[in-house]
C-alpha cells in the first residue's frame, strides 16, 4: 500500500510505491536470523498497512519488545498495550500537519511513549511548544523529542531554541544520515 503521506522533507520516498508482501512466518524467520528480541515497526506509515496491528500483537505474543514509529495520522487506540509508541507530530513545514489524528494524544502512556517533532524552522518549533503545552505532554511523563530537518535547520539553532524554552525536550538527529550513505535503504 505504501506511505500515504507526502512530507516535504521525506527521505524514504521509495516507501510511497515500493515494498513486498511477506508472510508473518517469513518475517519471524528473518528476525530469528538477527537474534534480537527488539523490533521497531516503522514506515513510511506502518498503520496504513491493514495487517500491522495483528502483526504487532503476534510480536508481543512471541515475547518481542515492540516499538512503533507512526506519523500520528492513524488511530493508535487498538494497539497492544505493550507496544511503545513513538508518535511523530507533523509540524507545518512537513505539509502534513493537517493529517494528525489528535485523539492519539490521549492514548500516550506516561513513562513509556514518546512524541517526536521534526523541526524545519521557528514556526515549527513554536507549533511544537504549543502542542506540548495543550496536551501537557511533559507534565504527563511523555518524553518529547525534537529533531532538525536534516540539511535545512542547523543542529545548534534547534538546541538553542530548546534551551531558551526551558522545557525538557530531548534533542536528537537522524543518526542514519551521519552513519550510512544517503542512498542506503532500510536503516
Image (spheres, rainbow, N blue to C red):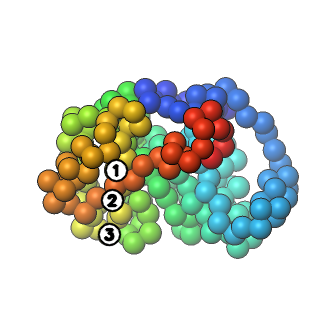
Marks 3 and 2, how far apart at CA: 13 Å
Q: Please provide percent x and percent y for residue 30.
A: 81, 56
Q: Residue at x 81, y 64 (%)?
A: 32
- Residue 11 position in % (x across, y down): 53, 33
Residue 146: image tag: 1
Residue 68, picture quadrant: bottom right
Quadrant occupied by the N terminus = top right
Residue 75 seen anywhere in this rendered image of the structure: no
Between residues 19 and 35, which one lies in front from this camera angle? 35
All told, the count of numbered labels is: 3
> CA separation, marks 1 and 2?
6 Å
Q: Which mark is residue 141?
A: 3
Upstream in the sequence, badge 3 or badge 2?
3
Q: Which mark is residue 37?
A: none
> Decide: marks 1, 2 in contact (CB < 8 A)?
yes
Q: Residue at x 29, y 68 (%)?
A: 140
Q: Position of residue 70 (x, y in %)?
A: 51, 47
Work out whether residue 54 can be spotted: yes
Q: Which mark is residue 170?
A: 2
Q: Please, is residue 59 above or below residue 158 in the view?
A: below
Residue 50 relative to residue 165: left or right? right
Q: Is residue 156 left or right of residue 22?
A: left
Q: Which-is-in-front pick, marks 3 and 1?
A: 1
Q: Earlier in the sequence, mark 1 or mark 2?
A: 1
Amino acid at each position: 500500500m505504501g506511505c500515504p503521506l507526502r512530507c516535504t522533507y521525506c527521505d524514504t520516498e521509495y516507501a510511497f510505491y515500493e515494498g513486498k508482501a511477506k508472510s508473518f512466518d517469513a518475517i519471524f524467520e528473518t528476525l530469528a536470523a538477527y537474534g534480537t528480541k527488539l523490533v521497531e515497526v516503522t514506515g513510511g506509515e506502518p498503520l496504513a498497512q491493514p495487517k500491522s496491528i495483528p502483526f504487532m500483537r503476534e510480536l508481543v505474543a512471541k515475547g518481542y519488545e515492540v516499538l512503533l514509529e507512526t506519523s500520528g495520522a492513524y488511530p493508535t487506540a487498538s494497539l497492544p498495550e505493550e507496544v511503545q509508541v513513538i508518535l511523530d507530530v507533523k509540524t507545518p513545514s512537513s505539509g502534513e500537519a493537517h493529517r494528525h489524528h489528535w485523539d492519539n494524544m490521549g492514548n500516550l502512556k506516561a513513562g513509556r511513549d514518546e512524541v517526536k517533532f521534526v523541526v524545519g524552522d521557528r514556526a515549527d518549533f513554536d507549533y511544537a511548544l504549543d502542542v506540548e503545552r495543550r496536551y501537557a505532554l511533559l507534565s504527563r511523563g511523555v518524553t518529547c523529542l525534537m529533531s532538525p530537518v536534516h540539511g535545512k535547520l542547523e543542529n545548534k539553532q534547534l538546541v538553542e531554541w530548546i534551551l531558551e524554552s526551558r522545557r525538557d525536550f530531548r534533542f536528537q538527529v537522524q543518526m542514519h544520515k551521519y552513519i550510512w550513505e544517503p542512498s542506503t535503504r532500510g536503516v
